[in-house]
Amino acid sequence: MVKYYIKILSPIPLLIWGAFYDGKTFLILMVLYIIYRQIVDANKLYKKGVITKNQMWFPLLNIRYFKDLYLS
């Protein structure tokens, strides 16, 4: 569980740097972070057996599985 939170929070300093450096850089980093989070969240749900491999690539599908992602 701690490993998951490290994965999702470790890019935050880079996003903060991008916000102070340049707006365009921040926007690019934010889009990449959103894609990264989708992959990390889907991977966690797949490993727990909550979703199938075919469901891994649907954006924002993980909202339905909030409890499985963050509370277990």
Image (cartoon, rainbow, N blue to C red):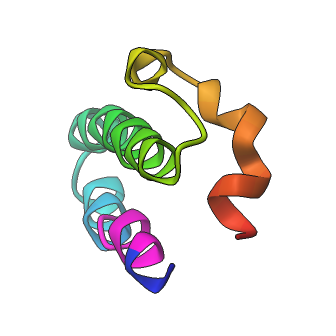
Which one is in front, 40 or 28? 40
| Residue with the most extreme front position | 49
Residue 8, quarter of picture: bottom left
Residue 40 position, x and y percent, is 37, 49
Residue 1 position, x and y percent, is 51, 78
Q: Quadrant of the C terminus?
A: bottom right
> In the image, 60: left or right of 16?
right
| Residue with the most extreme bottom position | 2
Residue 70 position, x and y percent, is 68, 64
> In the image, 52: left or right of 61?
left
Which one is in front, 54 or 29? 54
**Residue at 51% from the left image edge and 20% from the top image edge:** 59
> In the image, 35: left or right of 1?
left
Identify the main secondary structure in magenta. Answer: helix
**Residue at 26% from the left image edge and 55% from the top image edge:** 18
**Vertical position of residue 55 compared to residue 18: above or below:** above
Residue range corresponding to the magenta coloring: 4-11
**Residue at 47% from the left image edge and 46% from the top image edge:** 41
**Vertical position of residue 10 compared to residue 23: above or below:** below
Residue 39, quarter of picture: top left
**Vertical position of residue 68 compared to residue 65: above or below:** below
Residue 58 located within the stretch drawn in magenta: no
**Residue at 70% from the left image edge and 55% from the top image edge:** 68
Please state the total of marks drawn on the protein image: 0
Residue 20, quarter of picture: bottom left
